[in-house]
Each structure stands twice: as C-alpha cells, then as structure tokens.
Amino acid sequence: MRRAVAFVAEHGPQLTVQVFLDEERGLAHSFQLYPDSEAVLAHWKLSDPYIQDVMKHCTVQSFETYGEMSDEVIAGLRSGPVGTVTVRPGLTGFTRFGTSGAAGGDLLEDRLVGGGDG
C-alpha cells in the first residue's frame, strides 16, 4: 500500500490520498480526492499495472463516491471488483486547497479488506 501511495504521490492526478488503517478489524480506508472525472480516468490508466500488486494483499469491500461523476467513471466503478457503487452528489461546501480547479472535486473512497504490509 505504501509503495502504491508513493507512486501516486509522484505521478498521479489526485489532489490528496489518505489511507486509514483499522488493524483490529483488518480494514483500510483509502480516501482519494480528484479535481474532476478526467483525472479519475487518467489515474486508472496510469495505475492499472500497479494496482494488481495492491490487490494481492486485499480486496475491495465497497466504493463510495462523493461529488459529480461522469457516466464513464460511474460505469467503470460499477464494472470493477465491487459492482455496486454508492453515489452521493454534492450539495454544498468549500475547499481551502491552493490548487486551482479543486473547488467541488470528486472523492472516491475504497474500503479495503485484507492483510499484509503492501
């Protein structure tokens, strides 16, 4: 997991990636904020060869999305390892990031189940 996040930090389009661990229950939560759907699609193309290493150590239990997603992103999520995706359209809020285009943003959350230190 640390290698994957380090790779994305250097090469990925995400505005932020945060992974939280619940060792007692064997769960990890990965929060990823993207400026838009095009960035999600770019991340998928970039990370596809590397995500297989992460998936050796865990399975995706659920995907939850926050914000407006393109039909292509929603279809991609639904065809992925979970199938069912919770979509929550944005209502209101603000962003303090200094990155242009960050207002609104799209947030994806993976709930990962597994072990290993990947």
Image (tube, helix red, strand yellow):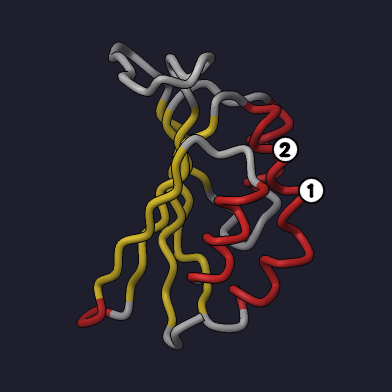
Residue 73: x, y in percent? 67, 35
Compared across the picture, whether 107 is left or right of 9 comes to left
In three-dimensional space, the C-alpha distance between marks 1 and 2, rounded to whole angstroms, equals 6 Å
Q: Are marks 1 and 2 in contact (CB under 8 Å)?
A: yes
Q: Residue at x 47, y 23 (%)?
A: 105
Give residue 65's mark. none
Amino acid type of the residue tagged 1 in the rendering: Lys
Residue located beneath label 1 in the image: 45
The answer to which of 82 and 69 lies nearer the viewer is 69
Q: Residue at x 61, y 75 (%)?
A: 55
The answer to which of 96 and 22 lies nearer the viewer is 96
Residue 118 versus residue 78 in the image, above or below: below
> SS for tag 2?
helix
Quarter location, residue 104: top left
Residue located beneath label 2 in the image: 41
**Residue most extreme to the left:** 24
The answer to which of 82 and 51 lies nearer the viewer is 51
Quarter location, residue 24: bottom left
Give the crowd class for mark 1: few <14, some 14-19, many >=20 residues within 10 Å.
few
Residue 74 versus residue 31 in the image, above or below: above
Residue 50: x, y in percent? 71, 67
Amino acid type of the residue tagged 2 in the rendering: Leu
Q: Residue at x 74, y 39 (%)?
A: 42
Residue 36: x, y in percent? 59, 24
Residue 16: x, y in percent? 44, 41
**Residue most extreme to the bottom:** 116
Q: Residue at x 37, y 59 (%)?
A: 19
